[in-house]
Amino acid sequence: MKRATQPALIPMSPFALLDVWQVSVMAFELWTSSFSTIARRNQLWQTQPFFSPRMMKENQRMVTEKLEASMEAGLAMQKTFLDMLDGRHAPWWVTSRQAMQPYHQRSSANSRRLAR
């Protein structure tokens, strides 16, 4: 029986280093866009009544997008876990990018939308 090799914790190839760099850039973009989105939403909540139709729609959209992103990230992690059970291991920089991608997309879109 052939034993599967474990992926390296430290990237050794230039392509893996590029993937690690992309994950770090994505994490930084996620952090900054989330921060600006939170600041803009707080400003909206302070300037408009919470029961206005626009704010109710925005709050509902916020919750829906968070749920969708968490479900997508959960599915990515489940797929990674099932792959691990099957003997296919992915490095941490690949799985972290897959888990962050839904949050990154929605956070960037929210930041752009609220900036208008």
Image (cartoon, rainbow, N blue to C red):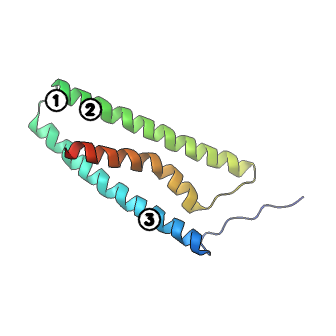
Please name the residue shown 75% across and 53% down the image: 87
Q: Do the residues labelled 1 and 2 touch (CB within 8 Å)?
A: yes
Q: Which of the numbered marks, if any, corresponds to residue 24? A: 3
State the residue position of label 1.
Answer: 50
Q: Which of marks 1 and 2 is nearer the N terminus?
A: 1
Q: Is residue 67 above or below residue 17?
A: above
State the residue position of label 2.
Answer: 59
Point out residue 31 in the picture as x, y percentages from the top left corner. 34, 57
Amino acid of disc 2:
Asn
Q: In this view, does 70 lie above or below 101?
A: above
Secondary structure type for disc 2: helix
Q: Are marks 3 and 2 in contact (CB under 8 Å)?
A: no
Q: Which of marks 1 and 3 is nearer the N terminus?
A: 3
Secondary structure type for disc 3: helix
Point out residue 85 in the picture as x, y percentages from the top left corner. 72, 48
Question: In which quarter of the view is residue 27 placed?
Answer: bottom left
In the picture as drawn, the residue positioned furthest to the left comes out as: 47
Please name the residue shown 37% across and 61% down the image: 28
